């Protein structure tokens, strides 16, 4: 009983609406759809819509179709169709059918003809600028087009001739005949068909006229059998038009549109136009650049489907727009990878650590846990020898009082290995430390001292004789302001770029056992962060991308 009460309390407004529709018999089952336009790559904002559309269908044992809104052939391409399908599958969702708005072109055209016959649509010769002028504003009513009162017969004839290609592009449009003084500008005789000579990726050159989204959307939904058309909040003002179309066309069981707030994530750019500029200007390496907010870019960087789904679940379903902190997304990724990612030791900025009293020809295998968070993952063996690599930052010749890593005369623990005490260092011509000499205590194998003495510092290491040289790409946020699209303070979003969004380290050293890696394999590099294998990797030189640091480094910056 308590569990049932909990379920009722946690219902969001979409679930409540669907529950009521099922209870009243408005619909017998639930069918949704995810309707992207194939004119670009999906970004993190789409992830929320995907989770809602597919998640609601799963919750009610219904179906969610993937339907491509391909009503604008000048911007669409099969490349985007394939990319969208890959991204949805990667997120872990399965569609019922793959559909296209172009599957319903005949239905949409017949609906347009029906509206004309009912006196609810007319052919208009006004230009696009004139239509905007006639529409009025939020404070001023619109005025009727001089072509609004054409007869049904004339409109049918003109629409047929538009369809046959007798008129040039842009010379005529078909408009819904609703109300030019409506307080909702979307209801002031919106354009529902236009002339457009463009080759369509599926229908070829069959059509010269193409429907506008506000006509294609409700008809595609209803013909397809969608019960609940879940849309982002910007379509709320379009809902009266959605309902008007279905009512006037006369469908017995029209679909129902419900809107939810879209995801707005700070430090992130999701405008397709602006993202395209980043790609075209070479600011990023492509749509899958790990700094991009595209799902393919996030996948390449090392984000996991589980982390993104968890993020969408945590922000929930809301009716009000808000800005989500990017740190929450990173926290979801850390939490997921902490449980799943194998540990490994990687030295990004290496200097040598030479153990003077360690035998020259000796090599040991140190056994360490693959992942302390999951004992079932077992252990791995790491080679240990006389010469190791450590981080340059882990030794300081003139160290301050609270520096607990290596310093002359100071003792630290080598992770899972031995206690070592620094003795001296070697420097190059520029005065930079290139090697540290130390001694080790053979009685401290495993990182524990039999006499109970304590050390405050623990550092990681890699055996020099067994190390693999790797390239490591340290990615950070692409923009250094919370709203990179806000051009009120600067001239362009380009000026908001973070100059430190990528640092490439070409001579990092990783454990010798990290071979035969696959693209996308994730690891926690101890004390460094979470990294994944990049597609640029080769057998000779693996490449790793930093997905996220161990801690939120931006928290201090924002203070």
Image: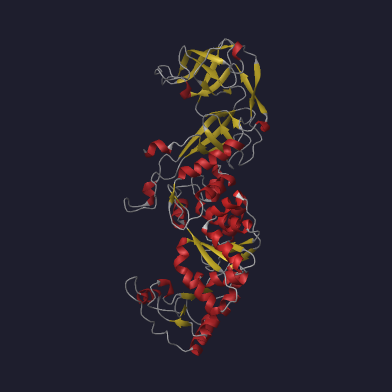
Quadrant assignment for the C terminus:
top left
Q: Residue at x 54, y 60 (%)?
A: 14
Q: Quadrant of residue 398?
A: top left
Whether 330 is drawn above or below 187: the answer is above
Q: Which image quadrant for residue 163? A: bottom right
Q: Is residue 195 visible?
A: no
For the rendered model, the colour scheme is secondary structure
Q: What residue is drawn where x is 47% and y is 57%?
A: 272
Which residue does the image show at 55% across and 60% down from the upper left? 16
Q: Is residue 186 left or right of residue 488?
A: right
Front residue of 97/248: it is: 248
User: Left or right: 220 with respect to 502?
Assistant: right
Relative image position of residue 486 (x, y in whole percent): 36, 53
Return the x and y of residue 88 as percentages of the image width and height: 60, 54
User: Does 311 appear above or below 113?
Assistant: above
Residue 214 visible, this angle: yes
Q: Position of residue 271 (x, y in %)?
A: 45, 56
In the displayed image of the protein, which residue is found farthest to the front?
A: 1
Q: Nearer the viewer, residue 9 or 15?
A: 9
Q: Position of residue 212 (x, y in %)?
A: 50, 71
Comparing 264 with 128, the one in front is 264
Total marks shown come to 0
């Amino acid at each position: 009983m308590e569990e049932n009460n909990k379920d009722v309390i946690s219902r969001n407004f979409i679930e409540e609406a669907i529950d009521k529709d099922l209870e009243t018999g408005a619909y017998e089952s639930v069918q949704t759809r995810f309707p992207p336009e194939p004119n670009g790559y999906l970004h993190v904002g789409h992830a929320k819509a995907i989770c809602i559309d597919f998640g609601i269908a799963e919750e009610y044992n219904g179906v969610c179709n993937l339907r491509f809104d391909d009503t604008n052939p000048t911007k669409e391409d099969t490349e985007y169709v394939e990319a969208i399908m890959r991204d949805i599958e990667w997120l872990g969702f399965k569609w019922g059918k793959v559909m296209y708005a172009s599957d319903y072109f005949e239905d949409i055209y017949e609906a347009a003809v029906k509206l004309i016959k009912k006196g609810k649509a007319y052919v208009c010769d006004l230009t696009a600028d004139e239509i905007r002028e006639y529409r009025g504003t939020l404070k001023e009513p619109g005025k009727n087009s001089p072509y609004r009162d054409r007869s049904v017969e004339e409109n049918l004839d003109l629409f047929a001739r538009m369809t046959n290609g007798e008129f040039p592009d842009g010379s005529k449009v078909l408009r819904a005949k609703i109300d030019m003084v409506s307080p909702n500008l979307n209801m002031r005789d919106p354009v529902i068909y236009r002339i457009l000579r463009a080759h369509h990726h599926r229908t070829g050159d069959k059509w010269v006229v193409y429907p506008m989204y506000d006509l294609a959307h409700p008809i595609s939904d209803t013909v397809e059998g969608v019960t609940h058309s879940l849309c982002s909040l910007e379509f709320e003002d379009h809902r009266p038009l959605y309902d008007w179309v279905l009512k006037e066309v006369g469908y017995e069981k029209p679909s129902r549109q419900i809107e939810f707030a879209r995801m707005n994530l700070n430090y992130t750019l999701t405008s397709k136009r602006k993202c395209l500029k980043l790609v075209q200007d070479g600011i990023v390496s492509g749509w899958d650049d790990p700094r991009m907010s595209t799902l393919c870019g996030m996948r390449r960087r090392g984000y996991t489907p589980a982390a993104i789904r968890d993020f969408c679940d945590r922000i929930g379903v809301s009716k009000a727009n808000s800005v989500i902190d990017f740190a929450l997304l990173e926290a979801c990724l850390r939490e997921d990878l902490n449980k799943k990612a194998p540990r490994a030791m990687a030295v990004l900025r290496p200097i040598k650590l030479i153990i003077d009293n360690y035998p020259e020809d000796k090599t040991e295998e140190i056994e360490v846990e693959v992942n302390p968070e999951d004992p079932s993952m077992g252990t791995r063996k790491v080679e240990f020898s006389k010469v190791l690599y450590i981080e340059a930052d882990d030794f300081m010749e003139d160290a301050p009082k609270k520096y607990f890593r290596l310093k002359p005369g100071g003792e630290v623990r080598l992770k899972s290995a031995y206690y070592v005490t620094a003795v001296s260092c070697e420097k190059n011509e520029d005065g930079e430390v290139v090697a540290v000499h130390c001694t080790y205590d053979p009685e401290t194998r495993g990182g524990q001292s039999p006499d109970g003495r304590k050390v405050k510092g623990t550092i990681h290491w890699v055996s020099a004789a067994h190390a693999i040289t790797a390239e490591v790409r340290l990615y950070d946020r692409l923009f250094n302001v919370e709203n990179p699209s806000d051009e009120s303070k600067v001239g362009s979003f380009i000026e908001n770029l973070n100059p430190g969004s990528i640092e490439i380290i070409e001579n990092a050293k990783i454990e010798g056992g990290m071979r035969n890696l696959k693209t996308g394999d994730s690891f926690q590099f101890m004390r460094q962060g979470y990294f994944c294998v990049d597609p640029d990797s080769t057998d000779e030189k693996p490449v790793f991308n930093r997905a996220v640091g161990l801690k939120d480094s931006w928290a201090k910056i924002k203070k």
